[in-house]
């Protein structure tokens, strides 16, 4: 009896958490967030927010890269908090094994035979359509045989991730690395 009661509490707890997630207005298909009521640290809703996300790893091949999705979460979360999209400038610098996440569907399928399509392509398209720069490290890309011809048309290639990160930070982008 206690075992079933404990299981019921766990199921209720997990279902409560998932019910609290909200879709964003900017990219509703990606980047769901939790509402935070009355945060003690107030969100500045009028200043320009320039951020660069350092994306250097991948996870499961059958779902969008959670680090890439962070950009959608950032946009949605801040827009829900009252920050105008015009006040957000976002860039992703993708390097390491994560460069494979920008491959077009056919090359992605050749590299990951269990996956018919690259689940990152719609996410990248949604991000770019909302002003996010997606920059790929040319060094990592060359190492992993990812080239402009076999990658999504929405990404741009840099000499290196280091180059892109330094240049963006010189333009007052703030680095976020998870």
Image (cartoon, rainbow, N blue to C red):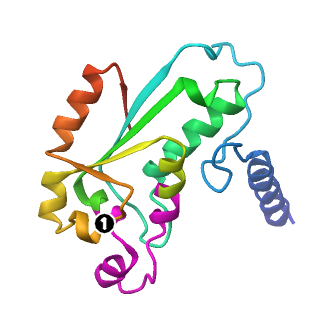
What's the magenta bit mostly, secondary-structure-wise?
A: helix
* Residue 42 percent location from the top left of the image: 65, 13
Residue at mark 1: 151
* Residue 174 percent location from the top left of the image: 37, 24
Identify the image quadrant of residue 60: bottom left
Residue in view at x 74 percent, y 52 percent? 18
Relative depth, front residue between 41 and 171: 171
For mark 1, give the secondary structure.
loop
Quadrant, the N terminus = bottom right
User: Quick check: 161 above or below 120?
Assistant: above
* Residue 148 percent location from the top left of the image: 24, 63
Residue in view at x 30 percent, y 66 percent? 151
138 with respect to 28 (left or right):
left
**Which portion, as a residue range, is magenta?**
100-124
Residue in view at x 80 percent, y 51 percent? 19
Mark 1 residue crowding within 10 angstroms, few (<14) / some (14–19) / many (20+): many
Residue in view at x 17 percent, y 66 percent? 144
* Residue 62 percent location from the top left of the image: 48, 73
């Amino acid at each position: 009896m206690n075992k079933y009661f404990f299981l019921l509490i766990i199921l209720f707890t997990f279902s409560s958490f998932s019910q609290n997630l909200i879709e964003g207005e900017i990219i509703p298909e990606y980047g769901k967030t939790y509402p935070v009521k009355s945060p003690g640290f107030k969100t500045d809703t009028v200043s320009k927010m320039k951020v660069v996300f350092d994306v250097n790893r991948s996870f499961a091949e059958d779902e969008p890269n959670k680090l890439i999705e962070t950009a959608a979460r950032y946009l949605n979360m801040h827009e829900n908090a009252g920050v105008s999209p015009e006040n957000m400038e976002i860039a992703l610098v993708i390097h390491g094994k994560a460069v494979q996440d920008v491959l077009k569907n056919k090359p992605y399928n050749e590299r990951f035979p269990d996956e018919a399509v690259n689940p990152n392509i719609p996410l990248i398209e949604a991000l770019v359509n909302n002003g996010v720069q997606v920059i790929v490290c040319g060094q990592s890309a060359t190492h992993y045989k990812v080239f402009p011809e076999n990658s999504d048309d929405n990404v741009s290639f840099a000499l290196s991730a280091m180059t892109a990160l330094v240049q963006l930070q010189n333009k007052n982008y703030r680095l976020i690395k998870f």
